[in-house]
Each structure stands twice: as structure tokens, then as C-alpha cells.
Image: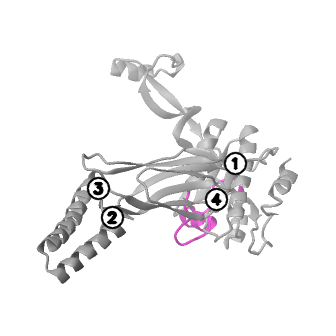
Amino acid sequence: MINILYLILFAGMLIAGLMTGQIWCIAVCVVMAAAVVVSALLIKLAARKAEFIINVPGIVSKNERFKVEIHLNANSFLPLGMVSCTLLCSNRLTGETHRYKINNSDSRFTLSSKYCGCLDISLEKIRFHEWFNIISFTDARKVKGRVLVMPDTFELEAVEPPATPTLKDTEEYSQDKKGQDRTETFQIRDYVPGDPLSQIHWKLSSKAGHPVVRDASQPVDHSLAIFWDRRAYGEDPAAADALMEAITSVATAYTEAGYAYTLLWNEETIHTFEVSNAEQLPEAISSLLKAVPPEKNMSGAEIYLKSRNEPQSGRVLYFTRLIPKTVSAIREMTDIQIFLCVGKNPVDTSMADVVFTPANMKETLQGLFF
């Protein structure tokens, strides 16, 4: 409103000066114009030191209302004028995007998500307005926050993976966690109080002049893999949500039953997460939610075979919303079970072992595993 009044006053003084020849009217116009220019320059200088902060919770549940707080710290003795921007909230899993306009430096929103996923919250189209709100300029800085909306799970009774031999000829050991297999060394490190005396490497300790221990390795179990075919399937958030809940529920069932497995998913490359206990499962599910689909939208099976040539697990539970073209080739290499989630768009289900929809997902999977 102030900009309209300012412009009306400026126009009135300018017209009066031109029609009456009064010098003081022209002088007032010059001062008013100079004030706007000086204001814009000062705001531009102040904006360089300004800092946006987005405060969001790290993890929430589906349909849980959470607060998004946006703060602007001036970090300068110069007061900032009006700041406008757009809050962008995008769900990586479902592809949903929502925008909210902001016209205050400090703003609070209460949001919620019907579907699970990773919500990328960012500010875009940031504009700083000088004090008279006549001139504004854009700011290209990146201000981001992230919220994980965890999937709901339902109870399943996990069956024991069949005794299908691993497809690897040699034992493979974990590169990121120690275990109980003393035939292989995970790492050599200094002794800390509480370490078993049986782990002390006496020969190296004598050379080092202080106690040194040897951590055993953890063999990687390749008997079972749960594979998520991560692709951009189009606008069908309910199906994306159902597929993730199915994967999470099956993984939780195997974990609670005490079975180790490999969780796999594809982005531009294949990602793996070895799950052998309940403490590792939340991090594994979080990694799934943060995944982004490959740019070429290739199936996970295609990317896997391209990078690794053959399956490395005796049994694969493959969760997807489109049957991969390479399914026949994979079936010749390993025991693979295709779990196909059908959304609002019809797809070919002829090669699927288990077909479910968002509406009957729980009933279908419990009929298999319960």
C-alpha cells in the first residue's frame, strides 16, 4: 500500500511542478526518487549479510501435522524491507509438489503429508524489496530443509528364506561393520577399556609399544535380497506410497524374525544396505525414502544387470510398479519373486507373481506371509 501512496504523491508533485513551474515541487520529486534509489542500494547491501533459516522436524508420521518455521536474520544494523518468496514442498517418492507464497521475513506454516516419502522444503523466487516497496531484486541463494515422512507398517509373519545357496563363489565381508568371523580382519585399532583380551594382537602390540586389538569381520549374507525398483512412474502418489509400505512391512517382518538380508534400490547406480538387526532398519528405510529415480528412468533390474552382470543373491523379492523387460533373463539366474503394485493406470501383470493395489495391499501380503 505504501508504494501506491508514494507513487501517487510523486506523480502529484511532478505534475504540480510541471504545470506551475514551482521549483520546490521538482526538488521534492528529485529527493523522493533519490530516496528510493538509496533505499534500494542499502537493502541490496543488507541482503548480502541476511541469512534464511528453515526449521523443520527431521522425522514425522503420515498425516502428522508439523511446523515449518522460516526466519530471516538481518546480521546487519540496516533494517531490511519486505521480503517475499515461495515455499516449495516436494515429495521425492510421490512426485507431489506444493507451493506457498510468503510475504514476511518470519513465517510459520503447519503442514502434513498424506503419503510417506522425503519432503524437500526449499525457498524459491526470493525477492528483497526496498523500504518504499518500489524497487525489488531477486536473490538466487539456496535455502533448504528436509522432512522424512515414515511409512506405516502392518504385521506380517516372515517365512524363513529357502536354503538357496548364494550365487557368489567366495565369501564376501562387510566393508562398514565388524562381526564375529575371526578368520578375516575387519580393522586393527588401539585397545580401549572393555575390549576382550582375546582380541589383543600381541605381536603388533609388542611392536607398537601399547595394546592393539584386532576386530573380526562380518560375512555378508547373500541368501535373500529385497529389491525396490525405483522409477518415476507418473502421477500416482497412492501407488507409490503403497509400494513403499509393502517393502517396509516385509523388511520389518524379516528383521523381527531375526533374518539378515540385503536391501537394494536403484538411482543412477545400484545402492545396497545390509540389514542384520533391528537397529539398522530405520537407517535403511530412511535411505530408501531419500532415493531419487534415475534420469533415464531405467528399471532397477536393467541397471543391476548392466553394472553387475548377474544377481548376487539366492532369492530376490522384487517390488515394482512396472514389470522390467529383463525379468525373463533374471529368472534364469536366480529365484526372483515379482511383487507388482497396480495403481490407477493399467499395466501388464502377466509376469508378476504377486499383484496388489493400494486398496488390497495389506490383505494380499498378509495372505502370503501370515
Residue 323 relative to residue 58: left or right: right
What residue sits right under mark 1 in the picture? 223
Residue 305 in picture, x, y percent from top left: 59, 65
Marks 3 and 2, how far apart in space?
Answer: 15 Å
**Given the image, on which type of amino acid does mark 4 rest?**
Pro
What residue sits right under mark 3 in the picture? 47
**Given the image, on which type of amino acid does mark 1 rest?**
Ser
**Given the image, on which type of amino acid does mark 2 rest?**
Asn
Q: Residue at x 74, y 48 (%)?
A: 249
Disc nearer the start of the sequence (1/4)? 1
Residue 176 relative to residue 334: left or right: left
Magenta stretch bounds? 291-318
Which residue is nearer to you in this view: 33 or 208?
33
Quadrant in the picture for residue 338: bottom right
**Mark 3 Cα shell of 10 Å, populated few (<14), some (14-19), many (≥20):** many
Residue 144 relative to residue 6: left or right: right
Disc nearer the start of the sequence (2/4)? 2
Q: Residue at x 34, y 68 (%)?
A: 5
Marks 2 and 1, how far apart in space?
Answer: 66 Å
Contact, mark 1 vs mark 4 (Cβ under 8 Å): no
Observer-side mark, 2 or 4, equals 2
Disc nearer the start of the sequence (3/1)? 3
**Given the image, on which type of amino acid does mark 3 rest?**
Ala
Q: Which mark is residue 311?
A: 4
Which residue is nearer to you in this view: 180 or 130?
130
Disc nearer the start of the sequence (3/2)? 3
Contact, mark 4 vs mark 3 (Cβ under 8 Å): no
Vertical placement of residue 287 versus 196, above or below: below
**Mark 1 Cα shell of 10 Å, populated few (<14), some (14-19), many (≥20):** many
What residue sits right under mark 2 in the picture? 133
